[in-house]
Amino acid sequence: MPKKFLTVNDVARLLGVSPLTVRNWDAKGKLVAYRNPVNNYRIYKTEDVEGLLKQIEESKGLARVAVAPEPALQPTLVLEPEPAPQLPRKLEITVEE
């Protein structure tokens, strides 16, 4: 029988986020927390977490569509480097006597 309620750590593991992120979602109202009557810890309904997971997966799909890659640009003109002009070298020889 599946669990009806999940702890902060359970939710974090299931969604692949940190426990702090789960608590932030709770504070922002993205996920409703209930309190364990014994220890007053946050607990979350399994169906609420599954709903949030579905929203996350759908938003990832939309993000992939919105950021569809554009075809790679092809160069139209390629410049070949020209050799630098050579300066004549002056050779100086000194003879010591």
Image (tube, grey):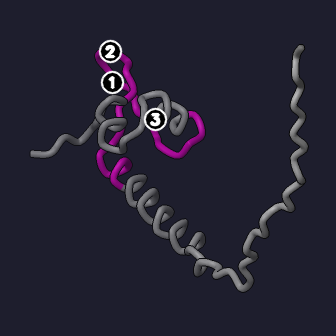
Q: Which residue is mark 3?
A: 22
C-alpha span from label 3 to label 2? 19 Å
Above or below residue 96? Residue 45 is below
Q: Is residue 9 left or right of residue 71?
A: left
Q: Looking at this view, is 39 or 97 the one in front?
A: 97
Helix, strand or loop at label 1? It is loop
Answer left or right for 55 relative to 24: left
Q: Quadrant of the C terminus?
A: top right
Relative to residue 5, is residue 64 depicted above or below? Answer: below
Vertically, is 77 above or below 2? Answer: below
Q: Residue at x 39, y 60 (%)?
A: 54
- The three-letter code of the residue at mark 1 reads Asn
- The tag on residue 39 is 2
Callout in the foreground (3, 1): 3
* Quadrant the N terminus occupies: top left
Tell me if 53 is positioned left or right of 24 in this view: left
Residues rendered magenta in the picture: 27-50
Residue placed at 36% from the left, 36% from the top? 12
For the residues labelled 2 and 1, say whether their Cβ atoms are less than 8 Å apart. yes
Q: Residues within 10 Å of mark 2 (few under 14, many from 20)?
A: few
Residue 55 position in % (x across, y down): 45, 60
Residue kind at label 3, given as amino acid type: Val
How many discs mark residues in the rendered view? 3
Q: Secondary structure at mark 2?
A: loop
Instruction: Please tell me in which quadrant of the rendered image residue 9 appears.
Output: top left
The tag on residue 36 is: 1
Q: Alpha carbon of mark 3 to alpha carbon of mark 1: how far?
A: 16 Å
Point out residue 92 in the picture as x, y percentages from the top left corner: 90, 34
Q: Residue at x 46, y 35 (%)?
A: 22
Calculate the distance from the C-alpha at mark 2 to the C-alpha at mark 1.
Answer: 6 Å
- Earlier residue among tags 3 and 2: 3
Label 3 vs label 2, nearer the camera: 3
